[in-house]
Image: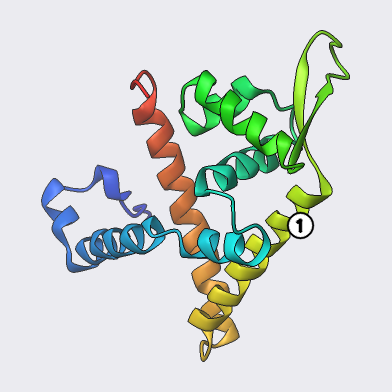
Amino acid sequence: MNEKPARIHELDPLSLESESVLSIGQSMTRMKLMTGRRLIGRLAIQSVAPDLELSHLDVLDAVRRAQPADEVTVGTIAEMLRIDPSRASRVVADMVSRNILRRAASQADARRIVVVMTPIGQRLLAEIRAQKMALIGEILDGWSEKDVDAFAALYERFIDGYEKAFERRDKGTPG
């Protein structure tokens, strides 16, 4: 009676064909198709900076994610987005010319140049967040608080596992 439940990767491979697991896979495909259309990013651009491209938002998000932990360089951005450093440099230069990002000397090493978000960049990020929260609110309309809490915890756990599995499998895979 002290048996621990088997983890899914320890189960017989045929059990991975269960209806629930297949449903998760199908839902992931549907979500990828919807997020691939980049609705939230397009709405934010339309609202705040109509002349930007989605690649600008990718760079802005990379700066946001990396900034609290470390100084952000063009190399950091290229690595995070898995793009060529020269492409990252061109996009950053364009964003600097639009006053979305600015270059500054590193506080740790004055020979190094870092990328910092400007107030316009912060406003754009705030608009993206507002668009995202409005969409999530629309989707969750009618859900009970208990269901939202349960989904939030399970979804976070799923995405954490997905991210870890991706990182394990992605090591050494070219661009």
- Looking at the image, which is closer to me, 50 or 129? 50
- Looking at the image, which is closer to me, 114 or 6? 114
- Estimate the x, y position of residue 94 in percent, counting from the top left: 64, 35
- Estimate the x, y position of residue 18 in percent, counting from the top left: 17, 63
What residue lies at 52% left-to-right and 43% top-to-bottom?
55
Residue, far top: 111
Q: Quadrant of the C terminus?
A: top left
What residue lies at 58% left-to-right and 50% top-to-bottom?
52
Q: Is residue 169 left or right of residue 115?
A: left
What residue lies at 15% left-to-right and 47% top-to-bottom?
12
Relative to residue 39, is residue 68 depicted above or below? above
Relative to residue 165, is residue 11 depicted above or below? below
Q: What residue is disc 1 on?
A: 123
Give, as a three-letter code, the residue at label 1. Answer: Arg
- Estimate the x, y position of residue 43 in percent, counting from the top left: 55, 66
Q: Is residue 170 left or right of residue 68?
A: left
Q: How many marks?
A: 1
Q: Is residue 132 left or right of residue 165?
A: right
Residue, far bottom: 142
Q: Quadrant of residue 23?
A: bottom left
